[in-house]
Image: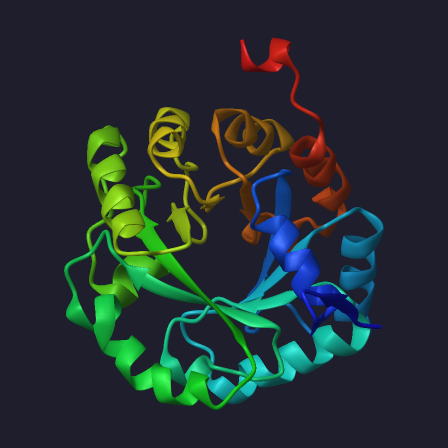
């Protein structure tokens, strides 16, 4: 079913994405790595559990997987689930028009031209031929206590955990460059999540939604990130190891924030 807005048709999926990125509510995104998420009944059961427990968004991406691998997983996710699916690409070959949209990531915390703009120039003509919702996203890698795949593959040093001022300056640069989202990531398998003080300071200085991912291992950590200012919390590795944690993580992220919580 499609709805009409200002004389133009708008899909329910786009409406859901607009709500998620409006900052009006805290949202939970699940990151699926095609190398690890499985397929068939295993993936179907996992997605059913996501829907039953209020997951808002599915991200699909991995550092090593090929474009065909991404396409296969996206097609399965779209077959089994009505949740919005966004690409979280590491390379232009991972563009898949079967998804609903793409986080057009620019690694603004790094100094590698390939990840700042090079891949984007290659990807742009491809994206122009699709109907994907393209979402300009400033991507910041934060020190999570170990070298992650993202750090290694991008040949990029993360922002130190005690340098909230550097994170703020970087996020502001992304904002002034017109990026719609800021995504701070400690990286897949990080020992520690993004520091709460850093989340709070960055959120004070940007208007758009703030996404936080990497190193989330408990409902308490996810809840703390939301209270600190995260609008969207991304859970990946934990659910690959313990899919039964979906309900607890969802409750922690979606619970209303009271005045007492903020104090």
- Quadrant location of the N terminus? bottom right
The residue located at (62%, 73%) in the rendering is 100
Is residue 208 at least partly visible in the picture? yes
Where residue 187 sits: x, y (%)?
A: 40, 51
In percent of width and height, residue 31 lies at 57, 59
Total count of labels: 0
Residue 84 occupies quadrant: bottom right
Q: Nearer the viewer, residue 235 or 100?
A: 100
Up-down: is 19 above or below 40?
above
Left or right relative to 57: residue 154: left
Tell me: residue 35, above or below residue 130: above
Identify the residue shown where x is 26% and y is 42%: 172
Colour scheme employed for the rendering of this structure: rainbow
Residue 40 in sight = no
Percent x, y of residue 242: 68, 48
Q: Looking at the picture, how far across and down is residue 37, in whole percent?
A: 64, 67
- In the image, taking residue 165 as reference, residue 186 lies left or right, namely right
For residue 256, what is the image quadrant?
top right
User: Residue at point 27% right, 62% down?
Assistant: 152
Q: Residue at x 47, y 81 (%)?
A: 95
- Is 236 in front, or is 27? 27
In the image, 64 versus 68, the foreground residue is 68
Query: Is 260 positioned to the left or the right of 144 in the image?
Result: right
Question: Compared with residue 151, is residue 77 higher up or lower down, i.e. above or below?
Answer: below
Image: 193 above or below 81? above
In the picture, which quadrant includes the C terminus? top right
């Amino acid at each position: 079913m499609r709805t009409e807005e200002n004389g133009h048709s708008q899909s329910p999926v786009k409406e859901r994405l607009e709500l998620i990125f409006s900052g009006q509510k805290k949202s939970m995104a699940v990151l699926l790595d095609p190398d690890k998420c499985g397929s068939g009944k295993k993936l179907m059961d996992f997605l059913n559990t996501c829907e039953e427990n209020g997951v808002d968004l599915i991200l699909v991406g991995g550092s090593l997987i090929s474009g065909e691998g991404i396409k296969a997983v996206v097609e399965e996710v779209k077959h089994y689930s009505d949740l919005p699916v966004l690409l979280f690409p590491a390379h232009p070959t991972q563009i898949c028009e079967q998804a609903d949209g793409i986080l057009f990531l620019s690694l603004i915390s790094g100094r590698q031209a390939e990840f700042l703009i090079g891949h984007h120039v290659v990807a742009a003509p491809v994206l122009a031929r699709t109907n994907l919702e393209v979402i300009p996203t400033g991507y910041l890698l934060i020190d999570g206590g170990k070298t992650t795949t993202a750090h290694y593959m991008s040949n990029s040093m993360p922002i130190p955990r005690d340098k909230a001022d550097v994170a703020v300056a970087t996020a502001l640069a992304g904002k002034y460059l017109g990026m719609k989202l800021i995504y701070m990531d400690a990286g897949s398998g990080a020992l520690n999540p993004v520091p709460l003080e850093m989340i709070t300071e960055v959120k004070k200085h940007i208007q758009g939604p703030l996404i936080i991912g990497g190193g989330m291992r408990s409902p308490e950590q996810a809840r703390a990130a939301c209270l600190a200012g995260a609008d969207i919390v991304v859970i990946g590795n934990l659910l690959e190891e313990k899919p039964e944690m979906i309900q607890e993580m969802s409750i922690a992220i979606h619970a209303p924030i009271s005045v007492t919580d903020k104090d």
